[in-house]
Image (spheres, coloured by chain):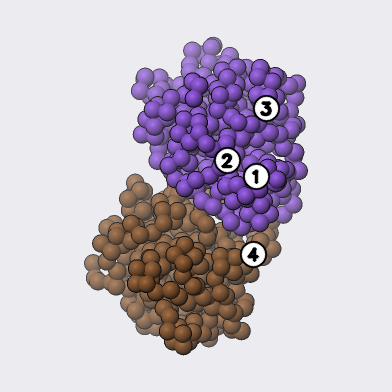
Chain colours: A purple, B brown
């Protein structure tokens, strides 16, 4: 395969650094979903850990390297899940963690960031404004900035999911990955192309936040002026060039799905699998719902990447 | 410790027989639950597998031994989870599986038993009548009867959860275990008393199905005429003497909880942990809610043993 910024050896080594509470997550077929989807469906569940998302895999690497270097402080911008994860990983190593988020971010995520002892600053704008503010804090205070998807640790951490997929599932045809900044997609995608190149890697993004998908199809960075989706975890507007370069190597396709499909996917996961997920985690099911013919008879794995939701909004979305 | 019917060596050996999809389940602190409960709470999540309960651990042992012996058919009575598990384990080994259940059993459980290819027979009575009918089928057809909690495989399978608790959690004070027939409680309890005797083993049963708890306190089998609880998975009336004997060795206490506490526990797990569980799986949280003083400042682990619910009933129970 063509080179990416990632190295399979480094990803394997990352497993030794990450707290086991984030590793070897459940992976199993979910037959109750299959009649409605027309294909074999396995789920990789990244919600059953202390921070209810996969992001701890990456922040464990970040925090352990900072601690090794004797550094004491770190800042990141976050839609909420990275912030929780960095707060958790930093707390365990005595780091001062600052998180910048949009004041429109999911309240449950912001509450947990505070509860984990991080300093939370809210900006009166979207996630891109939070990114700018976090960069300014890092510059002004001389502390480490963690940039999701750009910083290689965030991609390597996510990529350990790929190792677990390759090592465990007997055989599958396609992996569906939520696409936001790109850490999850480039991480898992790298491992697939390196170790199981026959598996199709399909990224899924909401129609209301299509920047990275448009960039992938156009083979150059495309930004958007705004986002309009309930899938807060993937609602970026400004793809990072280096991440796009990797995504062009590892992804076989990138598709957009409608909001109604995302909520239908969340509802299916609740009703037939007993799983509460956040909108970003339902993107894979949404893709299956929107193109049954494409996946008919295939064995598809989808990564359920997080479950941090405001429960009031959740109940409105799923209509339960 | 005093002897039970279980052997720690056999429990360790069982891990090599059980499909890994049921093993090494998530175990983590759930800090979002702690402010309301006043203690440190870790959960052992037994719902993230193909049958959404811990019962696969035991049926894997049963089915593999049947297959080794060249036997082709098996029958069990089930409130729904054992039946699903036996259907799953039997299907993978080409066994004919028959399940007898009450026609009042949870519809979602019965649907899944059928979907997994087992023959399902319903009796017009409660779980004890299903047990009698299953025994009659086994006798008449000359096939193996699996009796939950009496058959040692069901206890040894459940006991592998105990090994994972002892091997993983840094230290905890108390484990709260749903008490029904007793396989889970005696299995996990045996491992605790053998390998971590300082951990308090507390069994939890609904006030509406108190037979085993009353038996434990009375040190002799006490039956009841009926049950009245939403916790279908633990609603037995006739404790098995040999299981009670083991429970008397391994349990430090057995407590009863109210239905309102069970639903409150389910609601907390949904709202603060994003977890759908069946009533039996909320018994531990219910016990914490009913006796905050007893557990204040302790580190408590509770086993979330299943998530098979009728979603309509679930939403009524949790009021969401």
- The secondary structure type at the circle numbered 2 is strand
Q: Quadrant of the C terminus of chain B?
A: bottom right
Residue bearing the label numbered 4: B310
Seen from the viewer's position, the closer of residues B174 and A45 is A45
At which x and y percent is residue B229? 58, 73
Q: Chain of mark 1?
A: A
Circles 2, 3 touching at the beta carbon (< 8 Å): no
Of residue B33 and residue B89, the one placed in the foreground of this image is B89
- Which image quadrant is residue A301 in? top right
Q: Chain of mark 2?
A: A
Residue B41 in the image, given as x and y percentages of width and height: 46, 51
Mark 1 packing: few (<14 Cα in 10 Å), some, or many (20+)?
Answer: some
Q: Quadrant of residue B4?
A: bottom left
Residue B181 spot, x, y in % from top left:
44, 74
Q: Which mark is residue A213?
A: 3
In space, the residues marked 1 and 3 are separated at their CA atoms by: 20 Å
* Residue found at x 51% / y 67%: B87
Residue at (42, 84) in percent of width and height: B142
Between tags 4 and 2, which lies in front?
2
Q: Is residue B308 positioned above or below B133 on the image?
A: above
| Residue underneath mark 1 | A295
């Amino acid at each position: 395969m063509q080179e990416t910024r990632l190295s399979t050896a480094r990803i394997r080594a990352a497993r030794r650094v990450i707290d086991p509470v984030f590793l070897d997550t459940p992976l199993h077929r979910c037959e109750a979903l299959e009649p409605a989807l027309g294909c074999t469906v396995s789920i990789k569940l990244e919600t059953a850990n202390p921070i209810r998302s996969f992001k701890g895999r990456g922040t464990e690497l970040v925090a352990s390297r900072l601690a090794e270097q004797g550094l004491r402080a770190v800042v990141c911008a976050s839609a909420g899940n990275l912030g929780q994860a960095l707060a958790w990983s930093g707390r365990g190593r005595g780091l001062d963690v600052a998180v910048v988020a949009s004041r429109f971010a999911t309240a449950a995520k912001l509450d947990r960031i505070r509860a984990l002892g991080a300093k939370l600053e809210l900006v009166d704008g979207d996630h891109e404004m939070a990114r700018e503010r976090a960069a300014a804090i890092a510059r002004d205070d001389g502390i480490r900035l963690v940039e999701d998807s750009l910083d290689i640790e965030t991609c390597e951490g996510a990529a350990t999911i790929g190792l677990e997929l390759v090592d465990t599932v007997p055989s599958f045809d396609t992996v569906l990955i939520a696409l936001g900044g790109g850490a999850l997609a480039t991480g898992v995608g790298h491992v697939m192309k390196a170790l199981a190149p026959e598996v199709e890697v399909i990224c899924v993004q909401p129609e209301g936040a299509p920047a990275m998908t448009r960039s992938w199809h156009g083979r150059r960075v495309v930004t958007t002026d705004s986002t309009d989706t309930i899938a807060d975890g993937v609602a970026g507007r400004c793809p990072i060039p280096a991440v796009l370069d990797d995504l062009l190597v590892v992804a076989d396709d990138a598709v957009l799905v409608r909001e109604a499909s995302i909520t239908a996917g969340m509802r299916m996961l609740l009703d037939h699998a007993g799983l509460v997920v956040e909108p970003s985690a339902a993107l894979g099911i949404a893709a299956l719902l929107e193109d049954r013919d494409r996946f008919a008879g295939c064995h598809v794995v989808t990564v359920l990447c997080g479950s941090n939701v405001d429960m009031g909004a959740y109940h409105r979305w799923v209509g339960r």
